[in-house]
Image (tube, rainbow, N blue to C red):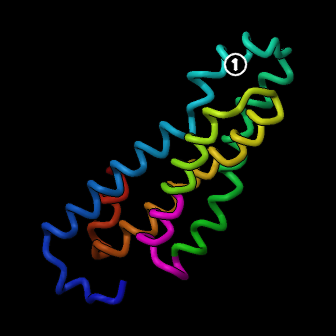
Amino acid sequence: MSQNLQNISSGEQQRALWLSTFAFTVCFAVWMIFAIIGIQISEQLGLNDTQFGLLIATPVLTGSVIRVFLGIWSDQFGGRKVMTLVMLCGAVATWLLTYAQTYPQFLLAALFVGIAGGNFSVGVTYVSKWFPPEKQGTALGI
């Protein structure tokens, strides 16, 4: 963001904060989708405990690893662009999940759904640039 913080209105700051919070909430719900539908998938495919555990853990692990890269990209390309990309990838991955029928297909879908879990590092980078240092703690806490 190339604007000086003195030229940013309080309304713009609040809009950035609340839209980022909403985007994080949506991405978190996508990221944890297997916690909701995992039991049904396990029953339908007859998964053992190890397979089920791997299916549930895959998006969490993907989100944890990709956070590093997304944070770097947010600094380089801007949080808005990276946030948009993360949300689009999460939406496409969730949509493709509807076509999965086998265990490997669900694992692949879980891998890409995990991208939504990296949203947190993007949101922190994006929101912090809208607020002066003395207000960043409150903004990031929200």
Which of 68/84 is in front? 84
Q: Is residue 110 above or below residue 134?
A: above
Q: Position of residue 23 (x, y in %)?
A: 39, 51
Kind of residue at badge 1: Ile
Where residue 111 appears, x then y in whole percent?
72, 45
User: Where does the N terminus fall, quadrant-wise?
Assistant: bottom left
Q: How many marks?
A: 1
Identify which residue, 31 or 67, lies in the foreground: 31
Q: Is residue 37 above or below residue 69?
A: above
Q: Does the magenta segment cover residue 81?
A: yes
Identity of the residue drawn at 57% across and 68% down: 71
Residue 65: x %, y % from top left: 71, 55
Q: Is residue 12 above or below residue 54?
A: below
Range of magenta residues:
75-86
| Residue 57 image position (x, y, % from top left) | 73, 34
Q: Residues within 10 Å of mark 1 (few under 14, many from 20)?
A: some
Residue at position x 26%, y 54% in the image = 18
30 over 8 or under it: above or below: above
Q: Residue furthest front?
A: 99
User: Is 110 colored magenta in this rendering?
Assistant: no
Q: Main secondary structure of the magenta part?
A: helix
Tell me the residue at 66%/21% (across/down). 38
Q: Which residue is mark 1?
A: 41
Horizontally, residue 86 falls left or right of residue 12, namely right
Seen in the image, is 108 located left or right of residue 83? right
Res. 44 image quadrant: top right
Label 1 element class: helix
In the image, taking residue 134 as reference, residue 109 lies left or right, namely right
Using the rendered view, name the quadrant where residue 10 is placed. Answer: bottom left
Q: Residue at x 68, y 41 (%)?
A: 59
